[in-house]
Amino acid sequence: QPAVSQHVKQLEAALGIALFERSTNRIIPSRKAWELLRNVEIALTSMDRLEASIFAIKNDEKQRIAIAAPAVFGFVTLPKVVATIRSKTASSVRSISGNYEQVGEHILSGRADLGISRLPLDPRLFEWAPIGSARNVCIFHPKHRFSTKSRVEAHDLEGEKIVDIDPQFASHQMNFNALRFAGVEPDILVEYDCNGYEVGFVSAGLGVSITNEIIAREYAAFELEAKPVEPTALYHYVA
């Protein structure tokens, strides 16, 4: 439409950036256009949140704090956070779940005020404070043979049913490489794509799983055992 094209050109001239890449009979949004759209969405979301906050203040309503975090932190960490918030304020809390990438998106979009995530993060986009660091552990049923060990090594997993994270995660590849280097072919019972699923299978005695110390602490109520794993990796959690 000529009128639309004219408006687009006027907008591009005003902004000083090309919003579309043009070729014969084809027009596609440029990378800068997508960045602009994202920033506009963030700004609009922020305005909506500001409007809601002003309305709440005027009407003496309780403020609401939105916290984004992987769902697994709903077992232990988030209840502690909510208890702390309620002990100091009258605010209610909205919990938003998602993987680490989605947590970042929730923060950037303004949908969440706080987030729990894992490094690396872009320091140009986020500010954070450390929560803790963690190394790999193997979690298993208390009656499992690993209970007598001080640590679990790759060769110990031979013949064990493994509840493993989805192949899209780097920790999956690290675990597989360690096992195969030790001459052990992994026997995968279940693959899961979100921390928290594995604890049910492990507590039922169906297999063992490799996670890290901070995630394992979320499973305290299940009374599983956890032992250090070699080789291991180091993870840094932040809020």
Image (tube, rainbow, N blue to C red):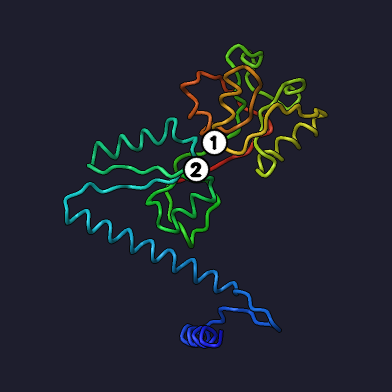
Image position of 4 with respect to 151: above or below: below
Q: Position of residue 107 (x, y in %)?
A: 44, 54
Q: CA distance from mark 2 to mark 1?
A: 8 Å
> What crowding class fits label 1: few (fewer than 14 Cα within 10 Å), some (14-19), or many (20 or more)?
some
Residue with the mark numbered 2: 237
The N terminus: image quadrant: bottom right
Image position of 91 with respect to 122: above or below: above
Label 2: element kind:
strand
Q: Give the number of the disc on residue 134.
A: 1
Asked whether 147 or 162 is in front, the reply is: 162
Instruction: Pick whichever of labels 2 and 1 is earlier in the sequence.
Output: 1
Q: Position of residue 163 (x, y in %)?
A: 66, 28
Q: Position of residue 10 (x, y in %)?
A: 49, 87
Numbered label tally = 2
Horizontal relation, residue 43 to residue 181: left or right: left
Q: Residue at x 80, y 29 (%)?
A: 185
| Residue at the extreme top | 143
Horizontal relation, residue 176 to residue 150: left or right: right
Q: Are marks 2 and 1 in contact (CB under 8 Å)?
A: yes
Label 1: element kind:
strand
Q: Residue at x 60, y 74 (%)?
A: 30
> What crowding class fits label 2: few (fewer than 14 Cα within 10 Å), some (14-19), or many (20 or more)?
some
